Amino acid sequence: MSKSIQSVQCEHLDKMDIVWDRPDTLIDVPMHYCPGCGHSVVHRLIMEVVQELNIQDITIGVAPVGCSVFSYNYMDVDMQEAAHGRATAVATGIKRVLPDKIIYSYQGDGDLAAIGTAETIHTINRGENIVMIFVNNGIYGMTGGQMAPTTLKGSVTSTTPTGRDLSIHGHPLNIAEMIAILPGAYYVTRQAVNSAKTVRKTKKALLRGFKNQIDGKGGVSFIEVVSNCPSGWKMTPLQSNKWLDDNMLGTYPLGDIKVPEKIA
Amino acid sequence: MAKLHGHVTINIENCKGCELCTDACPQNSLNMSKNINKKGYHYAILVEENCTGCTNCALVCPEAVMTVYRENKNRIIKPAPMASIDSKNISVSIS
């Protein structure tokens, strides 16, 4: 044992500045997610952005079906649960009835890219002024690790025990690239939450998306977040983040896919 | 290079022992405890005094159990007035 297991105490905390604390907009309850899950990080980042922009009173979120179905238990803003895949359709209705409110939809890959593909594409095609957050972990986490449309080639899941075969199961679906060609998409980006560096970038992207909506830019701000699923991938959280870096980012490269032109 | 001094306090009962913070810490200040919390997880603890308050651990923590403190060298701590002028609670203001 080289390291002691005693925790270090500090007696000068009152003389130090708090540089990071849990956002007040995140309800102080333990989350139901598995240890190391990226959903919790994305929840926290959205709530940090809501707190920074001071829009807690006018923000309405739309929760999906999937692992993040209980996200209204953690986010201290008005939330609406939608039917499976229909979060963006519900968000459209809320935004049209209450145009002064800030609307975001939060969906996983089973919700947005599988059952809700039609709603996703048509919401973006209509150019609704909302923020769409898409958490892509390449697997159906809640139902027990089945293959999703976003599952990588060769990935072993409970419904593809010999790995995903492209000739039988088709190709991984790159939703962000697909919707970026639609004129209704204003800002399309893909980020990740597997390290401190990528978390910082994801927060900037979310901040930009919400600012676009506040400024009324007229178009969907689509933020895809590549996340991990330690339980579905049958890995420890550290292994899953490493695997994400090595495998997921080859199929889903990070960065801005569609950036609005700067107005001179 | 000016050495920054920081500190982390951890809400150990909410920690799920995912070890992401120990990997994200550039100073290797964090480690997992040998003890377990009420949920049965080995929680994260600060084991070294070399924390710089970089907030990397807090950024990757899924449960947001961290509170990060950092020493501010620029903060001027005004000395308390030596004595008040009289007993009517008039404090001395140093301009």
Image: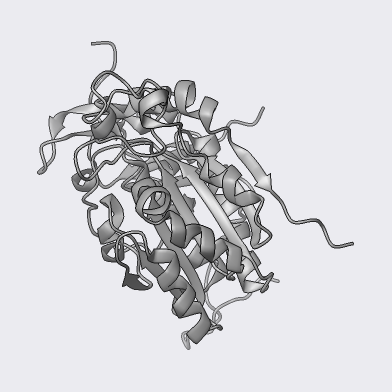
Seen from this angle, which residue lies furthest front? A167
Query: Residue A95 location, x and y as percent?
Result: 50, 78
Vertical comparison of B89 with A118: above or below: below
Identify the image quadrant of residue A162.
Answer: top left
Query: Residue A69 location, x and y as percent?
Result: 27, 58
Residue A21 can be seen, yes or no: no
Q: Which is more toward the observer, B25 or A238?
A: A238
Q: Which is more toward the observer, A72 or A145?
A: A145
Q: Residue at x 25, y 60 (%)?
A: A70
Query: Residue B31 location, x and y as percent?
Result: 30, 26
A198 with respect to A28 (left or right): right
Q: How many marks?
A: 0
Q: Which is more toward the observer, A102 or A15?
A: A102
Query: Residue A55 location, x and y as percent?
Result: 51, 74
Seen from this angle, which residue lies furthest right? A264
- Quadrant (top left, top right, bottom left, bottom right) of the N terminus of chain A: top left
Vertical comparison of A66 with A52: above or below: above
Q: Which residue is drawn at 44% across and 63% down?
A: A105
**Colouring mode (rainbow / by chain / secondary structure / one colour):** one colour
Vertical comparison of A47 with B27: above or below: below
Identify the image quadrant of residue A211.
Answer: bottom right
Q: Which is more toward the observer, A200 or B25?
A: A200
Seen from this angle, which residue lies furthest bottom? B88
Q: Residue at x 29, y 23 (%)?
A: A156
Residue A34 can be seen, yes or no: yes
Q: Residue at x 26, y 47 (%)?
A: B11
- Quadrant (top left, top right, bottom left, bottom right) of the C terminus of chain A: bottom right
